[in-house]
Amino acid sequence: MTEAIKAADFQLDMSGEPCPYPVVAMLEAMQALQGGQVLEVLADCPQSINSIPADATRAGYRVLKVEQQGPTIRYWIER
């Protein structure tokens, strides 16, 4: 996750949504992407710091970067 991150093709803002909704929405959104496209997810649910990367990886997607700025956590996930 240390390589340069390309700009996200799509953004999903799940700020204010409680878990597990950010994970569910991320998995649904990823299905609509083409191979190589990147989804940027914003969430402020504290549990998402573990669940989004774990579920994305388990589904076969590549977590490129995770960045926390205050309560907001940003994820870049490649299909």
Image (cartoon, rainbow, N blue to C red):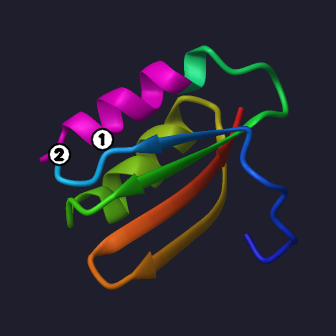
Front residue of 47/42: it is 42
Left or right position of 55 against 7: left
Front residue of 7/2: it is 7
Q: Looking at the image, which residue sits at the far top?
A: 32
Count of marks, rendered view = 2
Residue 17 is labelled as: 2
Q: Is residue 25 above or below residue 9?
A: above
Task: Kindly identify the amino acid type of the residue bearing the numbered disc 2.
Answer: Glu
Q: Is residue 62 above or below residue 72?
A: above
* Residue at 34%, 70% in the rendered image: 72
* Residue at 48%, 49% in the rendered image: 41
Task: Kindly identify the amino acid type of the residue bearing the numbered disc 1.
Answer: Pro
Query: Is residue 21 rendered magenta in the image?
Result: yes
Q: Position of residue 16 (x, y in %)?
A: 17, 53
Q: For mark 1, what is the residue? A: 22
Residue 20, by quadrant, is top left
* Residue at 54%, 29% in the rendered image: 59
* Residue at 34%, 61% in the rendered image: 50
Determine the CA span between mark 2 and mark 1: 7 Å
Residue 22, by quadrant, is top left
Residue 43 is labelled as: none
Q: Position of residue 66 (x, y in %)?
A: 55, 68
Give, as a single range, the part of the protein colored magenta: 17-29
Asked if the residue under mark 1 is in contact with the one under mark 2, i.e. CB atoms within 8 Å, the reply is yes
Q: Position of residue 26 (x, y in %)?
A: 44, 34
Q: Is residue 71 above or below residue 15?
A: below
* Label 2 or label 1, whichever comes before in sequence order: 2
